[in-house]
Image (cartoon, helix red, strand yellow):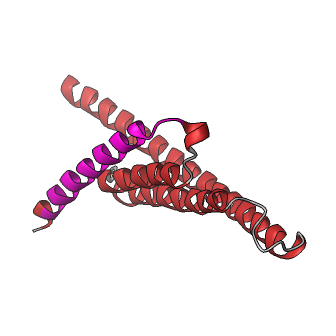
Amino acid sequence: MRQIAIASKDDSFLSAISKVENIVSKVMAIALVLIIFVALFDLLRVLIVDLFINEPKGFLSVPLLKIFGMFLNVLIALELMENVTAYLKQHTIQLELVVVTALTAVARKIVIFDSKADGDLVGLAVAVLSLSISYWIVRSQNKLHKH
């Protein structure tokens, strides 16, 4: 009888933890929606000001790499949203999505890389190689388990 009481306490505790995880995930999703719209608004503001308000000089006044970085920021935020959404649907962390998001973040860093300010590319190269190998391993394991 005592074992049943202890087991029921564990079950209620785990149920409470699950509810907290669910609430936190939903709050994170709402926060990510706000971040996505803020990042998108910032990108559109920069483009509109450069293209229509500033006097055209033939080139954008904002460096093109900064604009690419802003696009990739929105893309990374969307991928993070996909991670949170997948967690809410399946209550598991999708490792493949996490690795793809990390690869996108490192790719963003490479796209906007400024060798004068950012230093050496070796660390980014190691990160890309490591994440690419990780992605290949996770992807091939996922394919094996689906068949």
In the displayed structure, does residue 126 sit left or right of residue 81?
left
Using the image as rendered, state which of residue 101 and residue 72 is in the foreground: 72
**Residue placed at 85% from the left, 76% from the top?**
52
Using the image as rendered, state which of residue 49 and residue 37 is in the foreground: 49
Among all residues in the image, which is located at the extreme top? 2
**Quadrant of the rendered structure where residue 12 is?**
top left
**Residue placed at 47% from the left, 59% from the top?**
79
Question: Which contiguous range is marked in magenta?
Answer: 119-143
**Residue placed at 51% from the left, 54% from the top?**
108
**Quadrant of the rendered structure where residue 53 is?**
bottom right
**Residue placed at 29% from the left, 43% from the top?**
130
Is the residue 119 above or below the residue 84 in the image?
A: above
Asked if residue 142 lies in the magenta stretch, the reply is yes
Q: Position of residue 69 (x, y in %)?
A: 60, 57
Q: Position of residue 104 (x, y in %)?
A: 44, 55
Asked if residue 49 lies in the magenta stretch, the reply is no
Q: Position of residue 63 (x, y in %)?
A: 70, 59
